[in-house]
Image: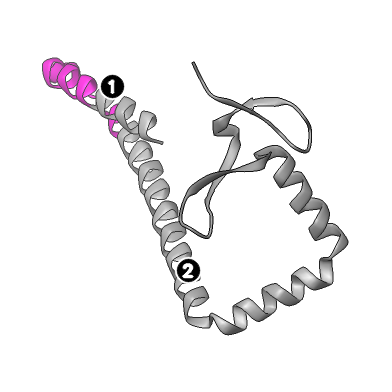
Amino acid sequence: MEETKICSCCHEEKPIDEYYKFKDVRGKERISSRCKACRIESVRIWREKNKSRHKDYTRQYRAKNKEKMAMHEKKYYEKQKAKKQNTSNDKSDIIRIEKCLHQSLNATPDISKAIAFKKQFFQKKLIQLRTVV
């Protein structure tokens, strides 16, 4: 049976996995008193009320941790660059295979066996690429 807990904010009984876990001062793992949904909502409200304070804190953090932020931004940029490159390669492969398939269908009937084999090969390859994209 799944463990449950009552949220101190919304007073609803929810499973333990809907609460954040943290370690207290002694290193003991604890479960927060508010559920994730209530915690997210309270943080959102606090940020709306304290926009300038949050902005100042963010600015100070970025100034203190320039190397860390630069490394994070570089890692994000590289990940996005690789993602974009992979999708563009997949699209160009699909276009190339569709052209080859079209050309093989319009070939002369002398080589019908080769065409049939080519057609099967390219259709399988096309299906594989479309499932990846």
- Is residue 67 shown above or below 110? below
> Pointer 1: what residue?
105
User: Residue furthest toward the right?
Assistant: 49
Q: Residue at x 75, y 53 (%)?
A: 43
| Front in this rendered view, residue 95 or 70 | 70
Circle 1 Cα neighbour tier, 10 Å, few/some/many (<14 / 14–19 / ≥20): some
Q: State the SS at label 2.
A: helix
Residue 116 horizontal/vertical position (percent): 18, 16
Q: Which mark is residue 122?
A: none
> Pointer 2: what residue?
72
Position of residue 58 in the picture relative to residue 108 (left or right) = right
Q: State the SS at label 1.
A: helix
- Range shown magenta: 100-121
The magenta stretch spans residue 107: yes
Residue 133 horizontal/vertical position (percent): 41, 36
| Front in this rendered view, residue 114 or 79 | 79
Q: Amino acid at mark 1?
A: Leu
| Front in this rendered view, residue 129 or 28 | 28
Please tell me in which quadrant of the rendered image residue 3 appears: top right
Q: Residue at x 49, y 76 (%)?
A: 70
